[in-house]
Each structure stands twice: as C-alpha cells, then as structure tokens.
Image (cartoon, rainbow, N blue to C red):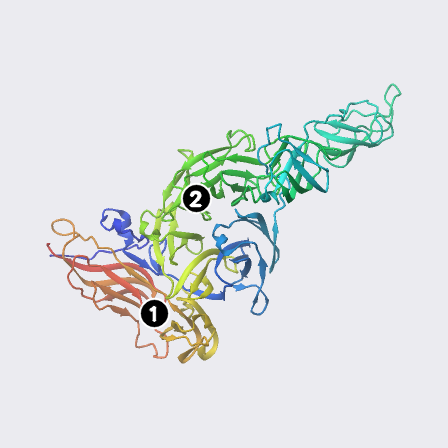
Amino acid sequence: MGRATPIQASLNGGELSPRLHGRVDQRIYQNGLETVTGFLPVLQGPAIAAPGTRYVAEAKGPCRLLPFEFNVTQSYVIEASNAAFRFYTNDVRIETSPGVAYEVATPYAFAELAELDHEQSADVLYLCHGSHAPRKLSRTSATTFALTTLDLSAGPFEDQNIDEAVTMSPNGITGAITITASSAQFQSGDVGGLIRLETEDFNGIGQWEPGLEVTLGEYRAWNGRVYQMSGGASLRTGTVAPVHSSGTEWDGSGVGKDINDKGPYGVQWTYVHDRYGVARITGYVSPTVVNATVVRRLPWLTGGETTWRWSFGAFSARRGWPNAVTIWNERLTFGKDATVYASVVGDYENFAEVNTLGEQTADMAIRVSLPNPNRIRWLKADRDLLIGTASAEHVLKAQSTAQAIGPKNAKIETQSTYGSAIGRPLLTAGRLLFIQKARRKIIQLDYAVERDRNEAVDITRFAEHMGKAGFVEMAFAQEPDRHLWAVDREGTLFACLYEPTEQALGWARRTMGPGLSAKSICRCTDPEGELDQIWVYATFGAKHLILRMDPIWQTGTAQKDAFFVDAGVTYSGGPVSSVGGLTHLAGAEVDILVDGASHPRLTVSGAGTVALDAPASTVHVGLPLPAQLKTLRFEVGSEDGTSQGKIKRVNRVTLRVAETLGIKVTVQNGMGTVLENRLDLVAMDQAPPLFSGDFVFEEIGDYDRDAQILIERTAPLPATILAILPTITTGDR
C-alpha cells in the first residue's frame, strides 16, 4: 500500500462533465469537481458560497425582466408582464402610492415577451417584436416612462415596382387621400404601413435656367425638384440654381446692375416637391383601394396622377415588423426576416436611402440581405455588425476598408455555423456570447486577427451536461467577480467564472431554495454604481416573486450581515422576538440567522411571521439555499502506476478555509463532521466566530475505489474553500 497527501489548490475549474471524469491528464481535472452546487468558482481559485436572494415584491403575474441602465447610479429593472411594464430602481419598486405599483401599458402579451428584443440609447429603450410596430420606451423623469410607436415616416421601403402596367393613382397630394391601384395590390395588413410614390417625369414643367424671364406663380424644375416663383425685384432669373429642399430662397442677388447696366437679376423660388412622396395607409377599402395620409408631399401639382414607380414600406402587419434591434455605428439597426435595415447615421428614426440632394452617400440608410433565407434572431454591435440566425452567424462590414461603410459599400460574411436560439446575446470583453440553437451550449464569438474573422468556441465544452434542460436567458456580472449567469427551462440558475484572458472557465449550479423556480434574470448596477446585481423572477407555487441577489461574500463583511437564504427578508433594529413580512413564504420551512448565529428552522405562519427562540437585532429569514461540493477521484499514483480504479481509504481531510462556518465534511459516504468553531472563550449567547485557516477532520472512510470527499453547508453562513488536502492510502489492486 502507498500513502499520499495530495492538494487540490484550486477549485475554479467548476463542475466538470461526466465525460471528463477519466481525464486525469488534463489541467482542468486538477481544478475541477464532480459536483458544484450553491458555490461559485472565482478567479483566485477558491469556491465561495453563493449568496442568497432578497424578496423585493410580488410580480403582477408571469413576466420577463429587462434591464434599463440610464447611468451607473440610475439603473432600472423592468418587470415586463402581460400588457404592462413595472419598474424597479434603487433596490425597490417604483410606486404611485404605498403598495401601488407604477405601470405603463404595453401591447405585448406574456407569450410574446420571450421574443421581445431591446436596445438602449441614453434615456430611450427601443423595443422590437415581429408582431408589433417597433416602439421606444422613454425615461421622462427618474420615476416615469412613456411608451410610443416609432415614427418611421422616411422608410425603409421594399424594392420599387418594375411592372409598368401596374400603376397607383392618388386623388390628392397632401392630407387625407385615396390611392387606387390598377390591379389587386392591397390587403388589410397594409394598414399602418407606408407607400412611396414617385413621379414618372415632370412633364409640363419647364426647367429652370439662368437669365430666363418668368412670371409670379410659375413652376420650374431643377435637379429633381419643383419650385414656384414667389417674388423678386425683377422677373428674370439669376445665376444661382435653386437646390434647397424647403422654404424660399433667391437664385440671384435681386439688386444692382451688371457692367452693361442691365439687371437686377434674381427671383425667389419656393420649394414645392421633388420626385417622390410618402403616404401612410390608414384604411383598407378593397384589393385596389386604400385610404392614406400623406407624410411627405406627393410629387404632383394636383391629384389624379398615375405612376408605376411605387414601393411599399418594408414594415407592416402584412409584411412583418422587425424582430431584432441594436445600435451600430450610430445607426438604429433592425433585423426582419433575412434583411438588415440600418438608419441614417445619427438619425435613428430616418431610413431614407438618399439625402436632400438626391444623393446616396455613405451616411444614408443601409439595406442588405443575408446569403441564406433564415430569419435573423439577434443583432449585436461590435467593430462590425454581428448577426445570428438559426443556421449561422454572420457579420455586416464594409466591402472596401478604404471607404466608410454605407449603402454602396456593405457586405455580409458568414463566420460560423453553430446556429443561434432566439434570445439576447451578451457582449463582454470584446467577445460575444450567445445561446446555441439547441439551447444546450453557450458559444463565444471572438475576433481572430490571423484569420480576419470571428471564431466560435463552445464555453460549455467542459460542462456540457449543464445545458441538458436548455438555457433560456443570460446575464453578466462583472463586479465584484466576473460571472456569466444563465437560467434554464427547469428553473435552475447557473454561474460560469468567465475570464478568457486568464483561461478561467468554471461552471456551477446555483439551485434555488425548495419550491422556487427561476424563470428570468437580468443585471443592473447597485444604487452606488459600484457592483453588479443579478435580479431574478421566480415562481413559488402560485406566487410570482421578484428577487435580488446579494453580493458575493467579501472578506471583512460583518458576520451578522451574512445573507445566505432565498426569497429572504431582513430585520434590523431593536431586539425583537418575531419577524414578519414573509407572507410570500407562508407555510414554508425557512432558515434563520440571528445576530450572526444559526437559528433552528421554523415554519412561516399564515400571517407571514416566525417566532424566534430569543430576541435578536439583525435577523435574516428565507428558504434554505442548497450548497455542496464533491471532489473528483484524486490521482495520487501508486507503486505500479495510476491510483485510478484501485482500493483507497481516506484517513484524514484538511480543509483550508477563509471566514467559514457551518459546513459538514463527509468522506467515502461516512457520517460526516461539522465545522462549528465553538470556542470556550465565546459566550453561549453569542454567535461562534467565522473560522479561517486549516481545519483537520479526523474522518476515516471505508475502503472504496473512489475516495471522494463531500462538503456541504449546514447553516446559512459564509463558506470559502481555499484548498482540499486529503490523506489517502492506496491499495495494490
């Protein structure tokens, strides 16, 4: 027999896939564990007990959480439920009066919220869903918001009709009009959409020329625009051609004479219209007739004109509304079906493809389609525009890097073929994270200079079993530790230590308290603007709860402030013998921490109270939070090779911990020993202090071939496991 004392000095490999349980040759095996539940791996190596969640309010009903961060000290969480938004800031719900939530009505049914995309710009949150016109939620004050429909009166538009036999005829040029088509072109779903009408020519309107005699009220055309002579000192045109697109301007000085004592020259020209106009369809009459309201004057002097140059707007109930949105290169960018629409630079609600001079410059709106017909599922702005579909991931970039990207200099390239699920991706540290189409993996897109493309890497590759139920939503908390959070279809939270520059990638389960099921998560900053908070919507029986996760335990925090319960509440003040405010947990068995000491579990009364054994000043009450670590099979070697598969016995376990209490260590399915740290110098009516250092468990296990160690938390107290040092005797066979 051989005897060894190995050390597992790092636990930040997290819970490893069963597929890796034989890979003792891999570095991550040395840092990994078989089970990590209720503990979080951190960059420095330890596993730290996951914090609890605080009860904030009862939600209106089933909901999804959306982030809205105006600035780092003014961050909001939106409770998006059936046809309503509610708002939380500074850790509390915004209310119109005590107990009455402030609400904004929305058109979104609960079943649609999973596909509701959003993008923020300053105090505006843009919202997209394929069944509704895009909207914007504007922050009108620190506690009020307004939801309005985007006024996209300048496009975008579909391709222009090319069949000269199919014409449109409006009966007016401004205001309310009727448009008649030469054949069946309209459906009821066109209502709310745009139609663009372009004149075939300016037949009957002469061209502007310099030195030309004109009369008051006469019309002239120049460079695709029509002007009306509206005044001047003379009736002879000047030498400066009119180019304005609104108002009235001179085409000459209008005063003085030339060297031949002739003049003055120059008259005033009032802009009338150019080659096209736009109307919004307001009513369906028949397949050939609709009512409309002109939003940009039509290009004729009177109604009744006919043109085959027309195009429908790209967005309507009939043609569909955009389902993805982002802000990229100062452009509001939509995805609808397999097409990307990007606005004019700096003018988010303007999708005009030409400027006021009729030129298609680089700053005008972009419209470009993907190389495959799969519907766009998400958009994300990076150096290039990143695009996700069910079959592949693409980028929209400049075709020529020598010129600015624009409508004439844009191309789409395929980057990877994992395929994406519907859901908002995350961009952190210059890397994009998205949920793969089967929802079992989370993929990282990272730009590789040597290949000039974004390479895709599966960040769940060491823990592929985590995604078995299917990931639903993600959030990223950068401070105080870099953790990617995810929730799955079964209501479990997951955390991944994500620090790619350090090659740190460790997964852990963060199971909710008994009866709690997480449904949605989001991130916002705390009221001080320093730490990231994870907010959770969870169900508890028939109740819908909004919860806020506490910060990860920080060294030096007062023991009485340790919060390791779920859906919990805190009382702080003068000594009390009972704690209330727990109606959301009525009938549930709860963990209790009183002045830093663990209290026996109690059942919450129907009135939402628990009676304490003795008065206490700081009390935390909530559902028990499961937490355990289980080691992999240690590789300690033997006289004739590996120790794997050989009979072993654990003779002793040394745990190196920091500020830890209330954990039990069990070896080889034995009885287990609890770390209590009750010293003689600590009075019996005071909490035993947290322990830091090496704690030796003289626990002798039975012989088996695994020699695994189980560490469980037995009380709602902090636990930071720095290293595990077992003494193991290995047999010859």
Residue 176: x and y, percent?
71, 43
Quarter of the image with the C terminus is bottom left
- Disc with the residue nearer the chain's start (1 vs 2): 2
Residue 398: x and y, percent?
51, 32
Q: Is residue 167 above or below residue 458?
A: above
Residue 36: x and y, percent?
31, 58
Report which residue position mark 2 lands on.
Answer: 431
- Crowding around mark 2 (Cα neighbors within 10 Å: few <14, some 14 to 19, many 20+) is some
Q: Residue at x 70, y 28 (%)?
A: 224
Q: Is residue 377 above or below residue 714?
A: above
Quarter of the image with the N terminus is bottom left
Residue 204: x and y, percent?
76, 25
Please indicate, yes or no, whether residue 40 appears anywhere in the rendered image: no
Give residue 4's quadrant in the image: bottom left
Q: Is residue 92 above or below residue 150?
A: below
Please indicate, yes or no, whether residue 47 appears anywhere in the rendered image: yes
- 712 vs 640, left or right, is right
Report which residue position mark 1 lands on.
Answer: 715
Give residue 712's quadrant in the image: bottom left
- Crowding around mark 1 (Cα neighbors within 10 Å: few <14, some 14 to 19, many 20+) is many
| Numbered label attached to residue 155 | none
Nearest the camera: 70 or 150?
150
- 362 vs 373, left or right, is right
Q: Residue at x 47, y 52 (%)?
A: 114
Residue type highlighted by circle 2: Arg
Tag count: 2
